[in-house]
Image (tube, rainbow, N blue to C red):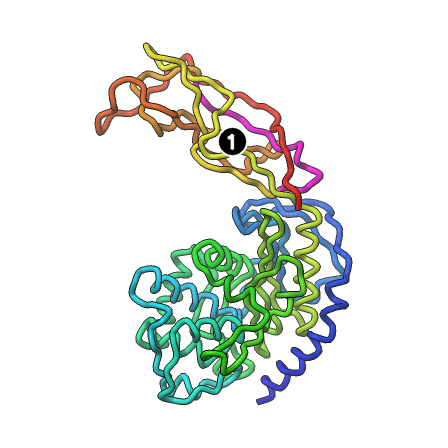
Amino acid sequence: MAVDRLHNLSRLSGMLALAAVLAMGAASPASAARTRRHHRHHAYRGSGPPYHAELLEDADSGTVLFAQSADLHWPPASMAKMMLLLVAEDQIRDGRMRLEDPVRISERAANTRGSHLGMREGDVYPLGELMKAALIKSANDAAVAVAEKIAGSVEACVRLMNEKAHELGMNDTYYGTVNGLPPRPDHDVDHTTALDLATLARAIIHNTDLLEWSRLETASFDGGTRTLRNTNHLVGHFDGCDGLKTGFTVQAGFNLTATAKRGDMRLVSVVLGAPSNPQRFALTARLLRWGFDNFTKVQVLRRGEPLPVHVQVQSGPMIQPISESDIALVVPKTKTSAVKLEYNVPQMVNGPVASGDSLGQVIVLDGGDVLTKVDAICPLTVGEPQRAGDSLSVSNSGGTAQSSALPISSNPK
């Protein structure tokens, strides 16, 4: 098919151009702006936008570091398989499926066109092998077989995929297929956005082990009888890149959702609609490099860390609240001194108070902008345990909010 020939030629040219691509210099940051997520992002300039949408996020917090047309509806193409595999992982985690479960290849799976393994009807493979092939090689027939195994039919799996998208807050995403394969070359039924794809990527990163496959340049299939070659050419060539998924159709162009980790900072990038195979890798490499060159991860607070404020329990002792959870931020390397903490904690509360009760909040600020918040909690029980329905009472004389500069020690890249 013409689409397959174009994809194969583009793959060859991409491999030839990749060394030159990865040697390109990073772009420099300029003025700041806002995304619809109300996270700050920083303008990044290359040689013009040979793409339809581009996005860079911190993988842990979802903070947007750069966005261009990130809410544009666009076909994901084979990146639809990311959601298929996340749904499959849910089934495995819930004990309904196992990676070792046998999957019989149906007539529908065997006859699936596009990138495929060439399996025959009646062949049997382990579920995990087919998931691996769908992720690394982007095998459409493997994706259909996985869908039929985990949901009973392709149509039922599509419903699960859309339900999962809704659960994740991917409100601009719709799946009509399990593999992104269009019903005809110039018509894709699936659509999503760069923002939604980054949300999906972060769910995969934090809730599955799929990166153990996507980080491989090559992998064996069917007991070593075949070799799967990763369609993501940054893996093994861009420092820290270990995923995630490519996508191509005539309408979508060349898409890539990628992730890379250096030190303790992991970034997620999305490029949609690049005009060629080499350019999607060039854009992604340049964007990720810019992120690592210009941002750093800062550990602001650690869970259980005592806070520099004190609270008097009425008719009780003075206590020092602790942080309920970790806070780590990805911030520009030149702006670490602008991050400050505000402690919205009262000077006095009426007891009793129990261990874990919220006494107030720690607010993390960048100038006047609120970056995030975390509860300041009581480290121990003071007085009689609270009964159901009782509430913590704050003395009117105690309301204070203290601000202080944050002593930041940036972690190395």
Quarter of the image where one finds residue 145: bottom left
Question: 379 above or below 190?
Answer: above
Tag 1, which secondary structure?
strand
Indicate the position of residue 334 as horizontal and vertical percent values.
71, 39
Between residue 162 and residue 375, name the one nearer to us. Answer: 375
Q: Amino acid at mark 1?
A: Ile
62 left or right of 24?
A: left
253 left or right of 121?
A: right
Residue 344 in magenta stretch: yes
Residue at the spot x=74%, y=66% of the render? Answer: 21
Between residue 209 and residue 181, name the one nearer to us. Answer: 209
Quarter of the image where one finds residue 383: top left
| Magenta span of residues | 331-346
Between residue 73 and residue 296, name the one nearer to us. Answer: 296
Quadrant where the N terminus sits is bottom right
Residue at the extreme front of the image, as rendered: 224
Indicate the position of residue 315 as horizontal and vertical percent values.
32, 10
Residue placed under numbered mark 1 in the picture: 363
Indicate the position of residue 138 as horizontal and vertical percent values.
52, 75
24 left or right of 364?
A: right
Residue at the spot x=37%, y=83% of the render? Answer: 124
Residue at the spot x=29%, y=25% of the render? Answer: 391
Residue 61 in magenta stretch: no
